[in-house]
Structure formats: C-alpha cells, structure tokens
Image: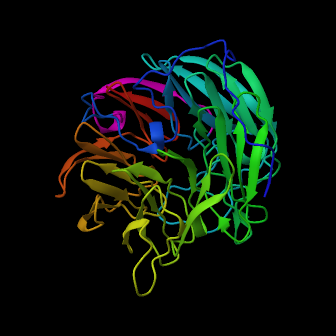
C-alpha cells in the first residue's frame, strides 16, 4: 500500500454556488447513503410517458439528453445533473437492448465528448453543459454499456464526475471547473473485452472515494475534495479481479469504513488509513451492486458464476466473515442468504423487507432481518432489470429495459400496482426528489410528478 499521510482537508469557500444541501436532495447514486429510499412525500403510482401508448399523463416535463449514457440523475440545489458521452460521428451510438449479452465490445470507439449536464428540476430546462474531455476512448465498452456509465456525486457545493480512463473532474454547481485529475487507463476487462467502467464516485465530508478494479492494477483510492490531491491508495491485487460496484462509505460510532464489493473478496477498509477491517468471500464473479446500510447493518450482494449471496454484516465486524462449511460463523455476519442475490441491480431495504431485481425480470422479496424469501415474481416476459430498485411512499419502483417502470406495493406479498410506459429502455436508476420521480431513458430525462 502506498499513501500520503491521511489528513483532514476541510472544503470551505471553494465554490461560486456555496449552498448547504437541502434535506430532500438526491446527491449520489441511489441518493444519500446509497439507500435508494425517499419517504415523506406522496409519489405517483401510475403515469404514461409514451405518446405511442396513448395520452401522456402524470409527466411534469421531458428534456432531451444528447449522446448515450447510463449515468443516473442526481439532484442538488433544485437542479438535476447527469453525464453523457456524445460521439463525433453522425447517428446514434449502438446499444444492445435484447435479452442476454455476450463478452462483446461495442463498435463505438471513435471520438467522444464526455459531458456533464445541468437541468432545472422544476421545468427541465437545460441550464448548462460542460465538456470534461474529448478524444478517442482509452478503453472499450460493452455493447450494453456506454462510455458514461457512472453517476455524479455532490455534497451540495461540489459536483464530482469520474469517467474511469477519461479522468476525475470537479465542478461547482454552476459548472465552473475547479480541478481535474488523470488517473490513467482503468480498463475493466474480462475475456479480453473492456466492459466499460461503472463505479461511481462516493463523497464523504472532504473526501472522494474511487474504486478502480482494473484486473491488471486494481486499487481503492481516496482524494481531497478541495483540490483532487490523492490522500492514499491501496492495491487490491489478490483481493479483486474485477468489480463495477460503487464504494460505500459507512460512518459508524467509532470509525468510518469503505465497503468495496468484489470478487473473490468483498473488503471493508478504514477511511483514514486504508487498513483492512473485514473481508468476506464466496460471492458471484461479476460484482456490480453497491453495498448499503439499513437496520444498523451493512448489506452486500452480488451474483453470476453460480453464486448469488445476500450478506447482512455488522458494522463493527472484524476479520474473515466467509461462512464456513460447518461450525459457527463469524459473529460479524448477521445472515447469509445463498442464491438470493442480484446480478446488476442494487437492491433496496424498505420497511421490514429487501427487494432485489434481476436481469431476467424477476423481483425477489426477502425478510430484511433474516434473509427468508417471501416471494419471487417475474414482472413480465419482456422485463430486464438493470437499473437499481428504489422505494418511496409505500411503493417499490422497478425500471426495466422493456421501457416500463413497474410499481409494486411494499410488503411481503406481491402486488403489482401499475406498469408505466416510458417509450424507451431504462438503464439508469431513478432519483426521487420532493415527491417527483426523475427517470432517465436512453435519450430523455423525464420528471414524473
């Protein structure tokens, strides 16, 4: 491990837009703490955003989005922010929607511009657009991925974009570039195909956390939010061969830890030093879902390769938590639900249950305190769940590649409330803000009121 001395760097007086984040702002991938829940306001359960399916209903506004990206919307200071990759060549960038996928790179490696876009949250009006970088991509992408998969992160003052090989960039909320850093090529490759970078940045106080599990040089690093200075870096060689998960920062009573999903090991690191706190093995070999906290525990899931666990872990756990073939498990592991995990979509804990969406269109509900399965239901023969599941107002929102957002009543028994047409596939995870559901499709940003 190489690191500079970890120290506090307080980010003050840095931005033209110096505002405190509003309580309801959705500041990162899956909102504050990556929990994917926004209660306290009524939210819609039925709408239609597809003109070919009948009159448009329940839609506050729709804004066109240039280029192609799976970057999910965030909301800060009454503005919506997303990323996109706009290619120079004419025509739409290729994107595979059909069921399944092979280890195939997209024919989309010509010149691109990586852009950050800002929209008025009340009207959908584009307020500004900034190009972070232009050029030939330094790594290929999968045919179902994009060159702008990652979601922005904000603390209410700063706006952080990380495009993997295309650099780390920090803006203020008015689009002024504060600093940029080039971390070199981060090629998340499998079978010789670069599948595209997919781990979003996480912000904790004055720190930015990045997970860069390039198989040739996997590492976790922490940077200063103020100036982009690298504070420490720890190698994950021998720990993780690949991961697309966003790192999760958990602030406990006695320590702050970073949980990094991975294969063959998911590991927790101390935020101040990078020292390992605990690890757990035996998961799926394509770790994509983001860890998060609920019920005072840390939840982790992953899938593919025959194993699909859901783990609930105590924040004060130490050592190796891998469930043994026999004997007593480490007391830091609350439960291990084998075969119940999700592959791409991050689950949500809402009330007493955890809801997991899978790429085959199946929604699974477990008891969040025991891991006991309550139901397993296919939403539709055409459903493919790649976006993460979110919850609000007693409802579970499940976007799908068939252009439908399925709304399910929260609870241990399956009850489908509505199928809502978006007119385009939904790869990105919705943001929920002040009772509005902000949904990014393949070419639009839509506000459901």
Residue positioned 50% across, 66% down in the render: 100
Query: Which of the pair 439/92 is nearer the observer?
Result: 439
Q: Quadrant of residue 380?
A: bottom left
Q: Assign the C terminus to one quadrant of the image.
A: top left
Which portion, as a residue range, is magenta? 49-67
Residue 400 shows in this picture:
no
Residue at the (78%, 65%) spot, across then down: 216
- The residue depicted at 66 percent of the width and 64 percent of the height is 242
Question: x, y percentage for residue 336?
Answer: 38, 71
**How far from the left and from the top, in percent, is residue 52?**
35, 37
Decide which of 96, 197 is in the foreground and name it. 197
Residue 255 percent across, percent down from the top left:
54, 47
Q: Quadrant of residue 16?
A: top right
In the image, taking residue 415 as reference, residue 64 lies left or right, namely: right
Q: Residue furthest top?
A: 16
Decide if residue 47 is on the left or right side of residue 108: left
Closer to the camera, 328 or 137?
A: 328
Q: Is residue 232 magenta?
A: no
Q: Report x, y in % for residue 158.
A: 63, 25
| Residue situated furthest bottom in the rendering | 326
Question: Quick check: 268 above or below 176?
Answer: below
- Classify 89 as above or below 14: below
Q: On the rendered image, what quadrant is the N terminus found in?
A: bottom right
In this view of the protein, can residue 86 be seen by the observer? yes
């Amino acid at each position: 491990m190489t690191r500079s001395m970890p120290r506090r760097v307080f980010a003050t007086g840095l931005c033209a837009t110096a505002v405190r984040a509003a309580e309801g702002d959705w500041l990162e991938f899956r909102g504050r703490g990556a929990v994917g829940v926004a209660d306290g306001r009524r939210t819609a359960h039925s709408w239609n955003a597809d003109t070919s399916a009948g009159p448009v209903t329940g839609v506050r506004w729709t804004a066109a989005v240039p280029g192609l990206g799976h970057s999910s919307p965030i909301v800060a200071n009454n503005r919506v922010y997303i990323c996109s990759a706009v290619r120079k060549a004419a025509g739409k960038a290729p994107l595979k929607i059909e069921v399944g996928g092979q280890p195939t790179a997209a024919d989309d490696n010509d010149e691109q511009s990586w852009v950050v876009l800002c929209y008025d949250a009340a009207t959908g009006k584009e307020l500004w657009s900034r190009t972070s970088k232009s050029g030939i991509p330094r790594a290929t992408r999968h045919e179902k991925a994009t060159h702008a998969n990652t979601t922005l992160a904000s603390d209410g003052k700063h706006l952080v974009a990380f495009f993997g090989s295309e650099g780390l960039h920090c803006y203020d909320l008015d689009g002024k570039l504060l600093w940029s850093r080039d971390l070199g090529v981060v090629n998340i490759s499998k079978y010789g195909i670069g599948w595209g970078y997919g781990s979003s940045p996480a912000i904790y106080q004055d720190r930015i956390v990045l997970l860069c599990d390039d198989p040739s040089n996997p590492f976790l690093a922490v940077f200063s939010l103020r100036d982009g200075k690298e504070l420490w870096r720890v190698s994950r060689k021998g720990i993780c061969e690949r991961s697309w998960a966003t790192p999760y920062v958990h602030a406990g009573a006695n320590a702050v830890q970073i949980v990094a999903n991975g294969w063959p090991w998911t590991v927790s690191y101390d935020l101040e030093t990078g020292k390992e706190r605990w690890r757990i093995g035996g998961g799926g070999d394509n770790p994509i879902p983001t860890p998060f906290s609920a019920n005072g525990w840390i939840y982790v899931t992953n899938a593919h390769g025959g194993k699909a666990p859901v783990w609930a872990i105590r924040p004060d756990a130490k050592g190796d938590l891998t469930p043994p073939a026999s004997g007593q498990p480490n007391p830091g592991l609350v439960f291990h639900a084998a075969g119940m995990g999700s592959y791409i979509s991050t689950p949500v804990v809402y009330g007493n249950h955890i809801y997991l969406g899978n790429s085959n269109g199946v929604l699974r509900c477990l008891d969040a305190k025991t891991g006991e399965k309550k139901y397993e239901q296919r939403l539709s023969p055409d459903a493919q769940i790649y976006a993460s599941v979110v919850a609000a107002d007693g409802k579970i929102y499940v976007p799908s590649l068939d252009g439908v957002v399925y709304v399910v009543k929260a609870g241990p028994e399956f009850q489908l409330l509505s199928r809502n047409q978006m007119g385009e596939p939904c790869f990105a995870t919705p943001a929920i803000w002040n009772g509005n559901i902000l949904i990014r499709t393949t070419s639009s940003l839509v506000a459901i009121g």
